[in-house]
Amino acid sequence: MTDLSDLTRDLLHAARTAGAEAADALAVDGTSVSIDVLKGKLEHAERSEGVEIGLRVLLGRRQACVSASDTRPDTMARMAERAVAMAREAPEDPNCGLADPDQLARDWDVAALDLVDTAAPLSPAELQDMAARAEAAALAVDGISQVSAAGAGFGDRRIHLAATNGFEGGYRRTATSLSCVAITGEGTGMERDYYGDSRIHRADLDDPETVGRIAAERTVARKGAIKPPTGAVPVIYDERVAGALIGHLLGAINGSSIARGASFLRDALGEAVLPDGLSLTEDPLMPRVSGSRPFDGEGLPVGRRDLVRDGVLQGWVLDLATGRKLGMGSTGNASRSTSAPPSPSSGNVVLTPGDRTRDDLLAEMGTGLLITSMIGSSINPTTGDYSRGASGFWVENGEIVRPVNECTVAGNLRDMLRRIVPANDARGWVGRQVPSLLVEGLTIAGD
């Protein structure tokens, strides 16, 4: 197994030798296997593995990044020389730079995050069997005409970061996934839906029969979908798509958007952006959740914090550069790839749940639209004007009466977020733990 710490140290040494004043280095070692089946037989198999390395060098307020998948010493020397040459020609950025040593994360507990499945990796034959069982379970449900995709996969990834400011650390993450897409009907009357599960620990994963059955049941429920009527009605975002609505809020408070002034929440710090009583909490230290990590992409400590508390926006999502540009400190949200400098990104978030089920929200809504799938988008990040294609179910008198498709939902995100009513059905193991959300007064363009 490649020693990633040695690679990052060698990259930093090469950077200093080439003339860099400061540098950080990232090494990533990953293995992934994916298997797809069709009609019970292997359709596609893919395996990838290898090491990627990335180097960022700084000369004063100039920086440059280079990356490679070749870890030979002469390659690293050429990478460093090229990066330094690029940095000399780069424009000055007054906000770039490494963290000060006293800002760095120390004494983190990777084991507490429980990010590694210690069970033996699944073989391709075992993954194929899982996918085939999911497909068979879907086909066994009355009304399913075919399964367009059934697949299983496994991934194992190690990350190591080091910098000339003294930071060095790494961690590992595993994942096993299983998914199925089923189809009902034929020709222009075809409808499809899906179900999938992905977990850090395979023991937590839904069994193949459950994955196939849920995908099929969701699909059969969509048979005979038509356009809904046009009008202004309440909308419920089902739990599986509700996270996308909160994702727009996260994008609007991202430091990159705020620094550019391209956010509908750019002037909302300290103001109400969600209903009273609702909080949106970021927690990068949740055990067995894929978005958890012991430190951020610049080696800074991470921790639980309220992005929104009791409806009021508490702060932005910042890395060092965007924090400096805004006259603030980093919030420990730097994300990093081998080929680009850090940028701010939110991780695990939890929205305050409600005290009612989704069915309770349907009853409260009376007549309206339940959205279970979304396609495309036309969103103005500066004004918050929102329009997305959607499909789901039409609701009357609090009951689902028919499936619907080919409609557009429109509104303004600032207004929409202030009116959300959460259910209590959020999944506790995904990165965005957001329940189904009722939003009043959106415009539906349908039939």
Image (tube, grey):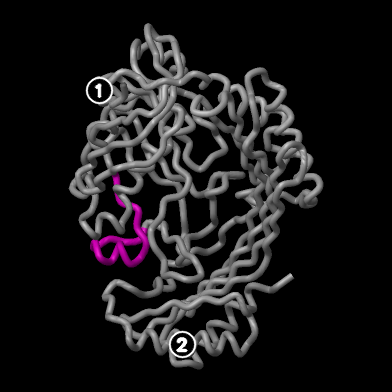
Whether the magenta-drawn stretch holds residue 421 is answered as: no
Residue 134: percent from left, percent from top: 71, 33
- Upstream in the sequence, badge 1 or badge 2? 2
The residue at the point 47 percent across, 60 percent down is 296
Q: Is residue 272 above or below residue 189?
A: below
The kind of secondary structure the magenta stretch mainly shows is loop
Residue at (60%, 36%) from the top-left corner?
Answer: 196
Label 2 sits on a secondary structure element that is helix
For disc 2, the marked residue is 82
Is 324 in the magenta?
yes
Q: Does 64 sit left or right of 47 as displayed?
A: left
Q: In the rendered view, tell whether residue 268 sits above or below residue 327.
A: above
Q: Position of residue 344 (x, y in %)?
A: 38, 58
Name the one closer to the observer, 318 or 143: 143
- Rounded to the nearest angstrom, the CA distance separating label 1 from label 2 is 56 Å
Query: Label 1, on which residue?
Result: 441
Relative height, residue 361 to residue 413 (above, below)? above
The residue at the far top in this view is 397
Question: What is the span of residues highlighted in magenta in the rendered image?
Answer: 314-330
Q: Pinpoint residue 298: horizontal percent, then vertical percent.
A: 45, 66
- In this rendered view, identify the residue nearer to me: 149 or 152: 149
